Amino acid sequence: MPIMTTAEAIVAALIAHDLDTIYALPGVHNDPFFDALFKASDRIRTVHTRHEQGASLMALGAALATGKPQAYCVVPGPGLLNSATGLLTAHGTNAPVLALIGQIAQAAIGRGYGHLHEIRDQAGIIARLVDHSSRIDGPVDASRKVAKAIQSMRRGRPGPAAIECAIDVWGQRGRVSAIVLPSPARPPKIDDDKLRAAAKVLGKSRHVLIVAGGGAQDASPEVTLLSRMLQAPVLGYRRGRGVLDSRDPLSVTLPLGRELWAEADAVLAVGTRLFNPLRQWGVDKNLQIVRVDSDPEEPARLYKPKVALIGDAAPVLRKLIDEIPKYNLRRAPRREEMLDRQGKLRERLAKLAPQLAFLEAIRAELPEDGVYVDEVTQIGFAARLAFPVHKPRTFLSPGYQDNLGWGFATALGAQHARRDVPVLSISGDGGFLFTSNELASAMRHRIPLTVVVFNDGAFGNVRRIQEEHFGNRIIASDLANPDFVRYAQSFGADAERARNPDELRAALRRAFRRRDGPTLIEVPVGPMPSPWEFIHMPRVRGGN
Ligand SMILES: Cc1ncc(C[n+]2csc(CCOP(=O)(O)OP(=O)(O)O)c2C)c(N)n1
Ligand SMILES: [Mg+2]
């Protein structure tokens, strides 16, 4: 048994679990940990940020882009709270993010003396944010606790975990047990009767709709095969985009999804809360729902499904693929019908022409495997409905948190973890300034992210609601902005202004060629047409 400090044991455990980067912001509580990172810097990179929100969101972006666990480290109290948005969004997007949080001296915890960065019941706050948390008591249990945390982040429903370590524990030296590695995932145990019941429902129904959520991102081949087998359109909105390639006419977003939901006799919901369909569009007993979810609690939360199959999407769907042919009806191909529906939707979506023209420019330049990172902005809302997505994990969205300002920092993490492809972040002028300080981190770590800032001088979404629904009483939504081009240049980043979709296209072409640092493109825009009629749509089933 080697002798190490707690900090060294944790670093060794992270490396053994294949983590190659720590996003971090240092401070006195965690000094021995940073020293251990220094000594291991040939095996694990430390990417320091300018605010803890940046650290947690970068870890989140890396996790969403790769599907693999990522970690960040911050000081206790304000550091933890500053990073909480990233943990919240990691929980909402089921992303495996490990938070390493400092703590005041062990003997002082809970006593309220007012130590530097002390916060009341830090462990309790953390426990509300993540499903798995622990405190390391010394070098002996470091490896085991890291292994448990990482295992909890991947097993069942993935999500964030946190480990606290006190200021006087990081440097403690002692014998360390061997690194514990997680045992390989077991194939899901699925009751034969349930599998048969699900296969019968899907095989014998005429009009099946597949709804894909974030939990289907690693099951794209299986969903694609099932879509063909059942002639079932696949609905993906924010976190389910890219599971079925948008070039397939059976790939749909909300407006056609609702139309098909109204007509369906069965739904296969994969790794999705099914929130929009169940809450907005309604449900009745003629719709048989089969749920596939890694979380046993999720399927019956809003509405009891006919059958729930619990496990990771890909292996469960492979079992269904083997079983369905025993019952499967012969169905006419739906390609032509779906092309027709897609054409009609395009005519309706023409209302969003200003947004769509910019999205076309982006799609024309962003390679198929390039990653698009969503934001809560006018272009973002339109992209969720109409931006073609070709591959899984190439459309990163904050899901139901929809937190303004996640985009830029999350995209930096995605680009850091996926240096092999261009990553594009879009932002409004409002959202960008939430985390734009991380331009300094992008420069320091040479992260070649491209960010497009659509500048309408306003919290445009809020402003439009005030115009349309509150008698034009505009409050707290007009913004004073910096000159974004000069702002980015002052960090040393490349920056230019694009005044229309053609100029944006040319600017993107230049930006994607640069691989040694960030580029900002500012696009001045006016007010844009409202997308809400395509997002919040009235009920189509189950009465009022
Ligand atoms: C963390 C957070 N705070 C506040 C909001 C509420 N909100 C939604 S959209 C929006 C305005 C966005 O402005 P901007 O980024 O400029 O995009 P635009 O609508 O102008 O395109 C605000 C404040 C939010 N979604 N998230
Ligand atoms: Mg704006």
Image: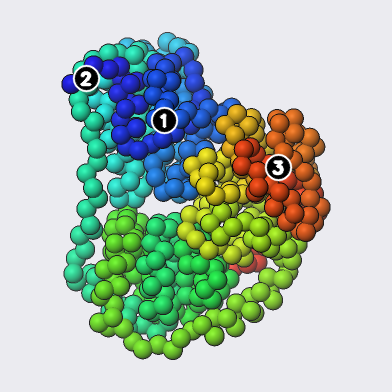
Camera sees residue 527:
no
Instruction: Point out the tag, 3 or 1, that comes first from the N-terminus.
Output: 1
Q: Position of residue 332 (x, y in %)?
A: 44, 89
Q: Position of residue 424 (x, y in %)?
A: 61, 49
Q: Is residue 68 left or right of residue 466?
A: left
Q: Amino acid at mark 3?
A: Leu
Label ID, residue 2: 2
Q: Quadrant of residue 538?
A: bottom right
- What secondary structure is marked by label 2? loop
Comparing 273 with 435, the one in front is 435
Binning the other alpha carbons within 10 Å of mark 1 as few (below 14), some (14 to 19) or many (20 upward) gives some
Taking 543 as reference, is 134 above or below it? above
Q: Is residue 91 left or right of residue 349?
A: left
Comparing 185 with 156, the one in front is 185
Residue under pointer 1: 44
User: Between marks 2 and 1, how big is the CA–CA gap?
Assistant: 20 Å
Residue under pointer 3: 520
- For the N terminus, the quadrant is top left
